């Protein structure tokens, strides 16, 4: 504790006046002759003791009042800080939070404007020769960041550039940045060293302080700090809080594409997650833009306070290629940065499918694949997703199989070893095979080819051809069970007659698939023989259909089950998870070379449209990394001068955690930095009280003068309470006393 006018402490000597007056004015009782009244004597003694206690208490209260008056006039201050800006050279580190949440509208202005104003106030308080450094939590890494400036001009210029750029779309991390700034101040020889943190105190920005269930725990780094250099405790932290009264806000937290497969002509939908961060209910509408054109909007979504909601927008693309999708929220709210979300779509123009048969007839109806062709291409519209090509068995040994996503092998009589080897290579690289048997299928040839390639050609070894006969009182089998959990069969059991109406007159029985890794998709009645099986081989899949797709072995092509099953099976086999070409702002974009020769030139088109050509040195790096992703939007990459140029379109979005309004408590921050002094400034518009506190400490004059006022009131109350009342001092008439028994006369 220090005193601004220590001379007034001499006035505390006035505290001896009450004891002196107490001794002078102490009353002595007059002694008068009176008859013996022993009971009155006891009463007088009790009254005297109460009066002595009252007088002593009043004397102490009056002494305390005089002492408090003297201390209050001496202007006492309490501070563990050194003199600031005037008591020697100062070294200041300014940690400026420029994360996305600082763009939130707060009391009519973005928080970032409050922060810039606070930083300028700090710079204006500096004197010549004072050291200052500037740190920011996110965005481009300016070379001047963290550099000591004694003229203050470089820091002012840098602050102007940061202010002009505005808050970033990235997440801020304050904990390690504050520790780094304090370590740098340890190198300074200045007498006074301070760290100013200008932030909205968003909880996610302080996550690296290792919070555990709302209580800050010291990390290993902090313990090392304390043990390494005790002078670190002498560097206080002043936190300027820019979060005051934020405007209500709704944010787009996430956008995902949901589709059977990313192919033109197939309905798709975007699933949008909204978050209402305010304390009042809100209603919003999401809009979907594709390549700059609005293609749909969601119904109005009602969001309760501090809650999330999910909505959907269904759309269809009429062409393949790369598409730029953007989801926007209509209207205005507290933060514009989280009202948009970008999504990059790679859409195939069509799924190339090959249908292989042994021969073709002049009459299309006689072809073994006639019904299959109709099922895979039910319409002649060019926008249909499946594009089947008809091949002969001879083409399998010459045509590149990689041109097709799925190959249907329909009623092929024999499979030789070269053909089997090519088909297995196709499977290993991710291709899909569908075997459909028929009257020409030779079981022995299939089994031999399967054994030649180590059992990777079929889901299971074949047994024999089964035909219904009158001897068994059976003219057909029916499909009795389907795997409704399989994507190609979901819903095809409602009603059960949809698949039970399929009759099979002949089929090729397979050996027990248990242990082969095959999955049974459909079984016949009777002995429960598998009819349709699936098995993964390498990166591909092979499917076995144990009957034909013509009307000679089954009525399957004529039943309502056939077309949806074949279409779903094709979509399931061709469907691949859409590539997630998106990152958060500030994160690097990594493009693997996929085993190709590394490119020497990469063309980059960022969201501002400027073309950048980056020359690369060929080395052993298996990927290309691009780190300048501070702006949100689309980044187009062309990796040139390689065998197969790679083109990718990435979407960069703001960090969704920046929309979380949760604020870290002061107690958590004080606990996290318990080894030093932590001060809080609640008004970033005016830091003058904070500067005064740093210069002079916390004034206790008001506290002592308040205690004086309380003491005077208390003294008055005690005096009045114990003073005799006026009515008590008036003589009172005693009621007539009549003893019950007359006293006996004393005999002399």
Image (spheres, rainbow, N blue to C red):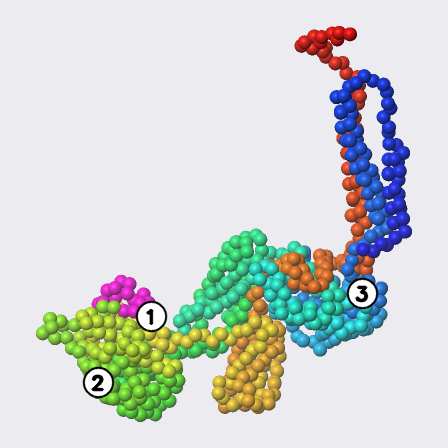
Name the residue beneath numbered marker 1. Answer: 486
Label 2 with label 3: CB-CB less than 8 Å: no
Image-based side of 342 in relation to 440, left or right? right
Q: Position of residue 338 (x, y in %)?
A: 58, 64
Q: Earlier in the sequence, mark 3 or mark 1?
A: 3
Quarter of the view holding residue 391:
bottom left
Mark 1 surroundings: few (<14), some (14-19) or many (≥20) residues within 10 A? some
Q: Quadrant of the N terminus?
A: bottom right
Q: Relative to 340, say whether 19 is above or below.
A: above
Q: Which mark is residue 448?
A: none
The residues colored magenta run 482-501
Q: Main secondary structure of the magenta part?
A: loop
Given residues 434 and 715, the one toward you in this image is: 715
Residue displayed at 42% across by 70% down:
259
Q: Secondary structure at mark 1?
A: loop
- Residue lying furthest left in this view? 471
Name the residue beneath numbered marker 2. Answer: 443
Name the residue beneath numbered marker 3. Answer: 124
Q: Earlier in the sequence, mark 2 or mark 1?
A: 2
Total count of labels: 3
Residue displayed at 77% across by 31% down:
50
C-alpha separation, residue under disc 2 versus residue under disc 1: 28 Å
């Amino acid at each position: 504790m220090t005193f601004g006018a220590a001379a007034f402490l001499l006035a505390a000597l006035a505290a001896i006046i009450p004891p002196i007056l107490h001794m002078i004015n102490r009353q002595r009782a007059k002694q008068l002759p009176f008859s013996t009244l022993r009971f009155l004597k006891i009463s007088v003694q009790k009254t005297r003791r109460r009066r002595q206690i009252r007088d002593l208490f009043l004397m102490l209260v009056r002494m305390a009042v005089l002492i408090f008056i003297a201390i209050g006039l001496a202007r006492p201050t309490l501070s563990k800080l050194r003199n600031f800006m005037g008591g020697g050279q100062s070294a200041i580190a300014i940690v400026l939070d420029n994360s996305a949440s600082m763009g939130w509208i707060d009391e009519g202005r973005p928080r970032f404007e409050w922060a810039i104003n606070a930083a300028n106030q700090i710079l204006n308080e500096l004197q010549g020769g004072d050291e200052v450094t500037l740190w920011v939590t996110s965005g481009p890494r300016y070379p001047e960041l963290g550099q000591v400036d004694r003229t203050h001009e470089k820091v002012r210029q840098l602050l102007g550039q940061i202010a002009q750029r505005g808050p970033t779309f990235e997440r801020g991390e304050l904990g390690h940045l504050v520790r780094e700034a304090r370590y740098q101040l340890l190198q300074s020889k200045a007498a006074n060293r301070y760290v100013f943190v200008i932030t909205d105190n968003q909880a996610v920005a302080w996550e690296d302080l290792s919070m555990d269930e709302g209580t800050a725990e010291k990390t290993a780094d902090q313990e090392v700090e304390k043990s390494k250099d005790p002078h670190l405790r002498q560097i206080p932290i002043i936190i300027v809080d820019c979060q005051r009264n934020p405007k209500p806000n709704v944010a787009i937290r996430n956008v995902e594409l949901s589709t059977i497969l990313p192919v033109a002509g197939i309905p798709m939908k975007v699933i949008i997650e909204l978050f209402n961060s305010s304390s009042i209910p809100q209603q919003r509408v999401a809009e979907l833009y594709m390549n700059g054109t609005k293609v749909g909007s969601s119904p109005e979504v009602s969001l309760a306070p501090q809650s999330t909601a999910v909505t959907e927008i269904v759309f269809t693309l009429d062409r393949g290629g790369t598409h730029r999708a953007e989801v926007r929220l209509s209207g205005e709210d507290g933060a514009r940065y989280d009202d948009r979300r970008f999504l990059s779509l790679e859409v195939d123009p069509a799924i190339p499918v090959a249908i292989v048969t042994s021969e073709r007839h002049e009459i299309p109806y006689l072809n073994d694949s006639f019904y299959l062709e109709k099922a895979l291409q039910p319409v002649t519209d060019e926008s249909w997703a499946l594009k089947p090509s008809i091949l002969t068995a001879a083409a399998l040994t010459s045509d590149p199989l990689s041109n097709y996503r799925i190959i249907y092998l329909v009623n092929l009589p024999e499979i030789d070893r070269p053909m089997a080897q090519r088909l297995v290579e196709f499977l290993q690289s991710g291709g899909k095979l569908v075997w459909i048997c028929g009257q020409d299928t030779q079981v022995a040839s299939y089994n031999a080819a399967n054994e030649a390639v180590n059992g990777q050609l079929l889901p299971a070894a074949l047994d024999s051809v089964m035909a219904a006969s009158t001897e068994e009182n059976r003219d057909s089998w029916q499909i009795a069970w389907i795997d409704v959990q399989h994507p190609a069969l979901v819903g095809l059991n409602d009603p059960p007659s949809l698949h039970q109406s399929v009759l099979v007159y002949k089929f090729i029985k397979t050996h027990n698939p248990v242990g082969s890794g095959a999955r049974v998709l459909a079984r016949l009645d009777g002995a429960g023989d598998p009819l349709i099986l699936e098995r993964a081989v390498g990166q591909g899949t092979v499917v076995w259909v144990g009957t034909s797709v013509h009307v000679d072995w089954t009525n399957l092509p004529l039943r309502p089950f056939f077309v949806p099953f074949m279409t779903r099976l094709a979509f399931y086999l061709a469907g691949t998870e859409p590539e997630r070409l998106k990152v958060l702002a500030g994160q690097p974009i990594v493009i693997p070379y996929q085993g190709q020769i590394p490119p020497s030139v990469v063309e980059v088109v960022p969201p501002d449209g400027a073309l950048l050509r980056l020359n690369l040195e060929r080395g052993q790096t298996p990927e290309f990394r691009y780190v300048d992703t501070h702006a949100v939007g689309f980044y187009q990459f062309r990796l040139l001068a390689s065998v197969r140029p790679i083109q990718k379109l990435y979407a960069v979005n703001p960090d969704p955690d920046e929309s979380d309004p949760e604020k870290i408590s002061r107690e958590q921050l004080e606990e996290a930095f318990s080894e030093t002094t932590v001060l809080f400034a609640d008004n970033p518009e005016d830091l003058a009280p904070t500067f005064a506190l740093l210069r002079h400490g916390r004034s206790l004059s008001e506290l002592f003068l308040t205690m004086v006022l309380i003491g005077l009131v208390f003294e008055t109350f005690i005096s009045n309470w114990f003073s005799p009342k006026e009515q008590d001092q008036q003589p009172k008439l005693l009621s007539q006393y009549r003893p019950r028994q007359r006293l006996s006369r004393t005999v002399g």
